[in-house]
Amino acid sequence: ELSPDLELKILQVGAGPGDRPDSIHVVMETSRGPIEAMFQPVEGGTGAVICVGGAMPGPEKWSAESIPGQLFDVLRPAGVSVLRLNYRIYNEFEECVLDTLAGVSFLRGIGAENIVLLGHSFGGAVVIKAGELAQGVVGVVSLSSQLHGTRQVERLGKPLLLIHGMSDTVLSHEASEDIYRRALPPRRLVLFADAGHTLREVRSEILDILRDWIPA
């Protein structure tokens, strides 16, 4: 459970050039500090994905080679925008859930109606909890997820896609199997035998799955 006294308010939003021509660098000034994100919008689109990463900061989360970095090119034809969000405080579960909820509020405020949350590793648990709490979220994708923070996954109440590599030496694929067993339908579990924690080996296969699953 999140502490009931936790609260975060968005005070104002600033925007500037992003890390590539189709992206906008967004800074959400909040009552708990600034949240930075890269936003790749589709004009007129009402679907969006929020991507969050693991417990440690690192530029690879936003790199062009990463799954979040390639997601916009895959989803743009379906009219789906992508927000790649950086946490204010890494490895603080409740704070990272608040950041994700702030991302949902931001997107809903600019017209998004259907939002999917996608998280990797630590972020896989963050999006399961945020998906339970947020209005406007219609699905959750959890990649190489940790177990901590997923105890109440049966409360999620929306489609859940779990993907894990069976050669993951950071977090065992048994974590995603455990989450899958406790989640309520509709849910889907995809395991890749030769993929490690980053899932880099099966990036194209995962993007193919997301190309179909997220717009649906």
Image (cartoon, grey):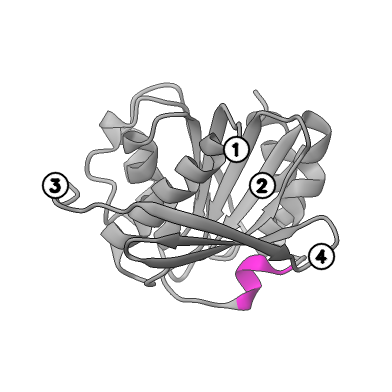
Quadrant of the snapshot with the C terminus = top right
- Tell me which label, 1 or 4, sits earlier in the chain: 4
- Tell me which label, 1 or 2, sits earlier in the chain: 2
> What is the span of residues highlighted in magenta in the rendered image?
59-63
Say which residue label 1 marks.
110
- Residue type at mark 3: give it: Pro
Q: Are marks 1 and 2 in contact (CB under 8 Å)?
A: no
- Residue type at mark 4: give it: Arg
Q: Nearer the viewer, mark 1 or mark 4?
A: 1
Residue in front for this viewpoint, 189 or 133: 133
Q: Are marks 2 and 3 in contact (CB under 8 Å)?
A: no
x%, y% of residue 147? 31, 54
For the view shown, which residue lies furthest in the left direction? 4
In three-dimensional space, the C-alpha distance between marks 2 and 3, rounded to whole angstroms, equals 29 Å
Classify mark 4: residues with Cα within 10 Å, few (<14), some (14-19) or many (20+).
few
Say which residue label 2 marks.
82
x%, y% of residue 175? 36, 52
Say which residue label 4 marks.
20
- Residue type at mark 1: give it: Ile
In the image, residue 203 lies in the stretch drawn in magenta = no
How many numbered callouts?
Answer: 4
Say which residue label 3 marks.
4
x%, y% of residue 77? 84, 33
